[in-house]
Amino acid sequence: MKKCSCLLLIFLSINNLLSFIQAQKLPKPKYSYDFFKKAKTTDMLYLNDTVLYLMTKSPLEVFSGYKNLYASYKEIHPVEIWVPIISQLPPSDKTTYQVIWVLKDSNLYLTDISFYSIDFCNYKSVFPNNEQYKLMEKLTKVKFDEKYPIPSGNPPLTFHNSIGMMPAKWFNDTILIKISASQYLGGQGKELPIYCSDANDTIWIKRPAQTMEVDKWLKIPSEELVFKNGKLISRKVTDIY
């Protein structure tokens, strides 16, 4: 009987301890990687022409088959690349291209398309007549238009496009954005010339600035952007880090 009483006492003590621990659970850390848990795209967004942001979703998601838009090109295929996750999301095993967006005067624009498996200088060989843009126009049923010129302050990610931006008139949704830990420097002495024989031209590329420290980046909250017909109607800071 005494032995049973001791076992019961031990059981009750352990049960009480577990209940106490459950009641005293530590609160969730304020700064975490919750933004990445929601992020489903490698697309990037520029605000004010030069500040680069990560996005949780692509405005192209409303179109079925957008991921396979360039499947007919043997040169375009998934590749493994390493990038600092706080700078941009690495492509998944099915992601072949990245879309660059610009928010200008409260309007969202598709500015250019970057392909992971095509060398920086070889775009003209693969798309001699700007076929990448024509396919995108066919998908969205919206034209690239020279009356929406590419912002001159943009880094190299948009240098291929010379036909103007595409207004994202179809987009009616909410996205979260968070500033990228990697930005680009401008000004004299901060650009690198690269000669592209394919284009028979020298391209000036902005040098990347030093990547932001992780601890500093974690403390920057994401922002919520709400769009209607491609126009920004709401922007606010969230508690998602």
Image: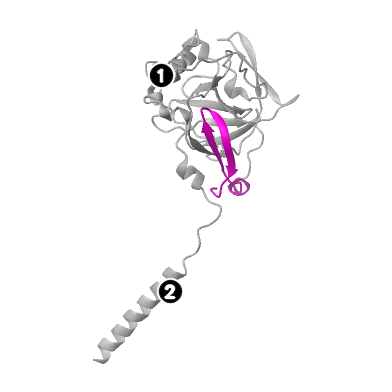
User: What is the crowding at mark 2: few (fewer than 14 residues within 10 Å), some, or many (at least 20)?
Assistant: few
Which residue is under mark 1? 70
- Number of callouts in the render? 2
Point out the tag, 1 or 2, that comes first from the N-terminus: 2
Seen as rendered, the residue at the extreme bottom is 2
**Position in image of residue 191 (x %, y %):** 69, 23
Crowding around mark 1 (Cα neighbors within 10 Å: few <14, some 14 to 19, many 20+) is some
Identify which amino acid the numbered label 1 is placed on.
Tyr
**Left or right, residue 124 beside residue 154:** left
Residue 107 in the image, given as x and y percentages of width and height:
58, 27
At 57% across and 19% down in the image, what residue appears? 165
The alpha-carbon separation of the residues under discs 1 and 2 comes to 57 Å
Which element is circle 1 on? loop
Which residue is at the front of the view, 231 or 65?
A: 231
Q: Which residues are magenta?
A: 214-241
* Circle 2 residue: 20
Dot 2: what SS? Answer: helix
Compared with 25, 71 (above or below) is above
118 left or right of 180? Answer: left
Q: Amino acid at mark 2?
A: Phe
Q: Which residue ends up furthest to the right in the rendered image? A: 188
Q: Is residue 3 above or below residue 217?
A: below
Front-most of 30 and 206? 30
| Residue 210 point in image, percent of width and height | 66, 37
Q: Quadrant of residue 195?
A: top right
Looking at the picture, how far across and down is residue 13, in whole percent?
37, 80
